[in-house]
Amino acid sequence: MMSQKSLYQCIELFFQEHLAAHRGVSSNTVKAYRDAIKIFLLFVAKTRVKHVTKIGIEEMTADAVLEFLDEVESVRGCSAGTRNHRLAALRVFFSYLATQSIMRIGQFQKILTIPQKRAAKPMMGYLEVDEVSAILKAIDRSTWAGRRDYFLLSLLYNTGARVQEICDLKPSSFRTDSPPLVTIRGKGKKTRQVPLWPETNRLLTEHLDETNLLVKEDAPIFCNLRGQPIGRFGVRYIVEKRVRAAAHFCPKLVKKTVGPHTFRHTTAMHLLQSGVELTVIRSWLGHVDIATTHGYVEIDMEMKRKALEKCNPGSKSASFKHLLKKHKDIVGWLEAL
C-alpha cells in the first residue's frame, strides 16, 4: 500500500519526470494538468473534511472523481467541454499512478473508464474579408504601437497561428529572402513552415528595422511599450481593443466575439473558400488530425446550404416531394438523386 508520502512523491515525479522529461509536453500543458489535479485534491480535502496533506491514496477513487466532475458543472458552472478537459488531465495522472502502484491498478482502472460527456460543439466564429480589412484599416499606423499591432494582426491572419505560437516567435523564426516564410513551433514541439504573403513580409522587414531586432535574433518578436515580451493575454487585449475600434466603422463586428483564435478560424475558412486543398490547410495550421481541419468544410457546406435556402426557400421540399412521388421505392429514389 502506498503511504501518504508516496502519493505526493508520485505527484512530484509526475510533473518533474513523467510530463517534462518523458513526454516532453509544453509548459501550458503542464499548467493544465497542474490546475486539474490541484482543484481535484482541494475538492477531496473539502468533502472528506481533512487537510489536503492528509489525503491518502485510498481516497483517489472513481466515486471521488465523479463527484468532482459533477461539482465542476453544477457548482462551478463550467461547460461539459471544461469537464471533459479536467477528466482528460486526471486520466493521464491516474494512468501514471497505475504504473507506480500495481496493487491498486483496479482502483485506478475504474477512473480510466469514466466516459467523456457529450458536449454541443459551438459554431466556429470567423471573420469575413471585409471585416478583417475594417479591423486593419481602423489602426492608426502613425504610432509605434499602431504599426506593431497592424503587423501582429496581419501575421495572425497570414499564418493562422495559435496565440502562444505567435508569442514564441523570434527574429530567427523568419526568412525574409525569397520565398519568405516563418517557422512555427506548435503543439507537441512540432514545427511547420508557413509562407508569408508579400505584404506581411514587408511589414516584418519594417518591424525588424524599427525595433532593431535584426541584431537580437533570440529576442521575442513582439514586445510592449516597456520592452517586455507580449504574452497570450496581451495579444488578446490588443485584438479586442482593435476590434472595438473597428466596430464604429463596421457594425457587423459589434455582434461578434473576436479573439486571437478567431483569426485562426478566419485563415482556415478563407483558404478553404479560395480553393486550397484540405491537406494544405492542415499543414498550414499544424493540425495533428485531418478531422479537425474537416470541421471547416462542414461549416462552409452549412453556409452554402443556408445561402441556397435563402435564394429559393420552397424549392427543397417541393423537389423532394416530387422525387418521392415519382419513385415509390426508396432504392429507385436514391438512384435518381
Image (cartoon, rainbow, N blue to C red):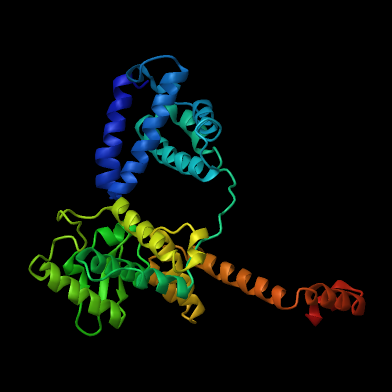
Residue 137 occupies which quadrant of the picture? Answer: bottom left
Residue 316 occupies which quadrant of the picture? Answer: bottom right
Estimate the x, y position of residue 38 in percent, counting from the top left. Answer: 36, 31
Query: Vertically, is 82 above or below 207?
Result: above
4 to the left or right of 307? left
Q: Residue at x 41, y 65 (%)?
A: 246
Q: Residue furthest bottom?
A: 178
Residue 119 in view in this figure: yes
Query: Vertically, is 178 above or below 290?
Result: below
Q: Nearer the viewer, residue 233 or 134?
A: 134
Q: Nearer the viewer, residue 240 or 62?
A: 240
Q: Nearer the viewer, residue 28 or 132?
A: 132
Residue 336 occupies which quadrant of the picture? Answer: bottom right
Q: Residue at x 41, y 58 (%)?
A: 259
254 to the left or right of 213? right
Estimate the x, y position of residue 40 in percent, counting from the top left. Answer: 42, 30
Residue 58 in view in this figure: no
Q: Residue furthest front?
A: 248
